[in-house]
Image (spheres, rainbow, N blue to C red):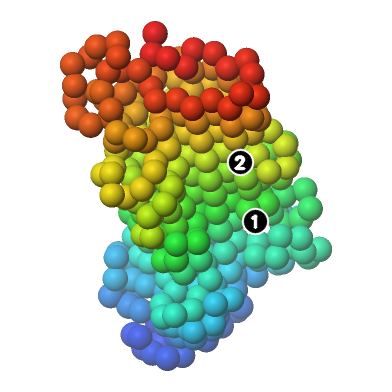
Amino acid sequence: FVGETHIDVADAFNMTDNGTDGMTKMQLALDTAPIGAHLHIPPNFNVAGGTSLVMSRAMQIVTHGALSRIRLDTTNPALDALQVAITDAGGFGDVRGLTILSGGGSVSTNGTGGNNAININPTNVLASQKPLFGFVIENITASGRNGGIRVGGANVAGDTNFNVIRDCPFIGATDAGGYDINLDGCADGHLIEGNILSGQGWSIRLNLVAGAFSTQIIRNVIKGQTGGIVSANADHVDLTANQFELLGNRTGGSYNHILMQGLARKQLYWNVRGNNFGGSVAALGVTTTLSIVEAEQCMFEDNTFGLTVGGVDIALGSGASNNVFRSNKRRGAGGSGLAAPTDLGRRLAVTIDAAALGNEGIWYP
């Protein structure tokens, strides 16, 4: 969708900065502007209110700088600041190439309530809902109690594919049980690139439909306080050149940079390459970089590990089989500082379940 109509929502809908009816008037803009329109929120302008916005018609929201904001003020834990559930695509069966949000502004939930800042396909299976292919969210701050950005599937097949979340300066959940980015029931080809993910919960959750492939997570800063990436179900994941930092669980206990659960079945064909896994201080609890519970035929190559003494670099569970580990290394003995590059200092700290079979090349060669 490349719209020709540009609308300043403050002028066109008689909004006032930080007015209590801002969300109501913004909803009117979403409901009445021409399909494909660019809805511009001016610089230094707050669209605020206590009701969720619902984008049911395909159009683009353009912010103008960091002080151009959409803010949901609520005590209701079920409300999202912005829901994208498109049922009117101008006569088309799906929506392609839609830049949902851009411009450097922010979308947030504020107060004791709120769910996600942005929730795409909130009711995963809905007969009238149009699949989204190639949507873009870029250069946006997204902060919600339960999540920054959640992406569901438009139908039972998970049809919401080949979408991009990139160059966002902050995406975060404000609750320890939340997810900065939650791919939850969508399908193939998502690109998460160049974002800073530093909320109170997990940075990224992967829960894709069975058989979904080619999820790319590239060049992000990943430092969620509960954990880095938790994967319930995902195959063919390319995880490359990310910087993981361990900020530590707020209540102590264990922490994982990557937790590969594989709840429905084993996860297959991951390529984890060239990532830097940052360290911690001992007071933040037991730490594990790669906790591989159910995974098969995955490649872990050229990664750098830097956990503290007492942490585990790789933990292989009973369902970890036929994975390959090659040319991974520590940043010194015990992960604390840059020790002399001796063989002992560069060996990884590994725990292996007795039932884990066929994994190769775990030690630094």
Q: For label 1, count other residues whose C-alpha is less than 10 Å away and answer few (under 14), some (14-19) or many (20+).
A: many
Number of labels in the image equals 2
Q: Is residue 128 visible?
A: yes
From the viewer's perspective, is the residue at label 2 or at label 1 nearer? Answer: 2
Circle nearer the N terminus (2, 1): 1
Tags 2 and 1 touching, CB below 8 Å: no
Q: Nearer the viewer, residue 57 or 293?
A: 293
Describe residue 339's horizontal placement relative to residue 50 as left or right.
left
Q: Nearer the viewer, residue 161 or 347?
A: 347
For mark 1, what is the residue?
A: 152
Residue at 35 percent across and 18 percent down: it is 347
Q: Position of residue 351 (x, y in %)?
A: 49, 27
Q: What element does badge 2 sit on?
A: loop
Q: Position of residue 225 (x, y in %)?
A: 38, 54
Q: What element does badge 1 sit on?
A: loop
Residue at 28 percent across and 28 percent down: it is 334
For mark 2, what is the residue?
A: 261
Describe residue 266's horizontal placement relative to residue 251 as left or right.
right
